[in-house]
Amino acid sequence: MKKILIADYIYTPEGVLKNHAVLVDETILQVAPKSKVLRDNKDVETIEYPKYSLLFPGLINAHVHVEFSGNKTELSYGDFINWLYSVIENREELMQGCDLVCMTKAIDAMLANGITTFGAISSHGLDFEACFNAKQNVVFFNELIGSQAAAADVLFGDFLQRLERSKEQKRKGFFPGVAIHSPYSVHPVLVQKALEVVRKERLPLTAHFMESLAERQWLDNAKGEFKEFFDKFLQQQKPVSSAKEFLESFDGVSTLFAHAIKASDEEYETMKRNAHTIAHCPISNRLLGNGALELEKIEKIGVKWCLATDGLSSNYNLDLWEEMKAALFMHTDLPLLELAKKLIAAATVNGANALSLPKGEITKGKDADMIVLQLEGEPTPELELHMILHRYEIIDRFIMGERV
């Protein structure tokens, strides 16, 4: 059903508009002066917001693990390998301790924080029901993991079963996809088989890549902290793939790569050439001791990036406003106001582009996914910075034109 939304201000790619209105159904039909929209649509429901209200694109969390949403103090932070050992040690408890209610609570918290779309990395399919029933748009990435050739057929069969389930049950705003865990944890045979499915069915694709120094040292030289880890758990003395081989497998398939902190310049060039995007998760990167993505470098090379929270196994909140604030203070080498604008884009339109969805902007033809912020005064040229610092109240939310 059509609606006219009237806020004091509208945040658009052309700038902040005043005395304008937005006509929506499932998509944005018109952004025009308020008088024109009202004159042309006399019998349409009108929703008008208070003074200093701002109509803003819904936030997009491109990379989140919902299955481990039960973690609060079970896992170890500060070092990636210590964290990984703690995940393995507490895995069953964490998975059993987060049921449908727990996962739904995490998803609802994202909505409360203005996240109207998210990309869920599903390792076991335990989060399927919660994600399928979510109010938000969901790209449901069925994850493939397994580095041992002997188990490849079984692992791939399980992966296909989960993928088929996500394809069979349909709802508006729910999109099945594929996640290939990482170059150190997925055998090349499995990578190629999964990519055949992706290419044939044109599915969204994501993978973790170069999150830690341990991953870099293991893939390059079969050394470092991963050496003991793989020997202990898998009796594996060398990596199944090099970083170069893994990355080149994705040639021609636009992919969302999570983290990429320790990637080389050559690998960034490969990402640029294939129109890949990096999902930057600053809080997770800090908590796991992995350092910070060099935004200035990847932008100079021309690699696209968006913002994401990762999961509650490596974060304390699924909140992109917090993520933007953390990034604002993490990347001290970038000009403050310029960075604030980039972070807003990274949490909206860049995430939409990374997930290949027509969202993230208030412009004609895009999906009507929006939130309404209650500002405290007239917006200034520093609006993006103020939004990140002051965390304005969200007073309304729309997904595909429906109030939620």
Image: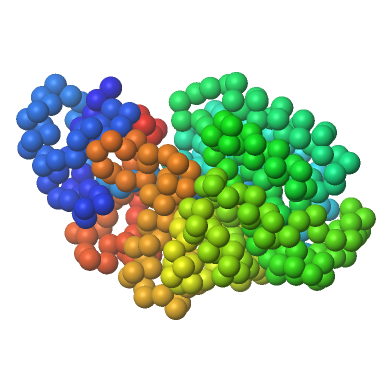
Residue 343 figure quarter: bottom left
Q: Is residue 43 left or right of residue 350?
A: left
Above or below, 33 against 80 in this view is above
Q: Residue lying at the far bottom in this picture: please name it.
A: 333
Residue 74 figure quarter: bottom right
Q: Where residue 216 appears, x then y in whole percent?
A: 71, 67
Q: Is residue 79 left or right of residue 152?
A: left
Between 88 and 303, the residue placed more toward the observer is 303
Q: Where residue 233 appears, x then y in whole percent?
A: 89, 54
Between 224 and 374, the residue placed more toward the observer is 224
Residue at x-position 66% and y-position 69%: 289
* Residue 72 appears in the rendering: no
Quadrant where the C terminus sits is top left
Quadrant where the N terminus sits is top left
* Residue 337 appears in the rendering: yes
Residue at x-position 60% and y-position 21%: 168
Q: Is residue 44 left or right of residue 291?
A: left
Above or below, 299 against 355 in this view is below
Q: Where residue 237 appears, x then y in whole percent?
A: 89, 61
Residue at x-position 14% and y-position 21%: 43
* Labels in figure, total: 0
Q: Is residue 56 left or right of residue 95?
A: left
Between 2 and 76, the residue placed more toward the observer is 2
| Colouring scheme, one of rainbow, by chain, secondary structure, one colour | rainbow
Q: Where residue 12 appears, x then y in whole percent?
A: 25, 50
Residue at x-position 91% and y-position 58%: 232
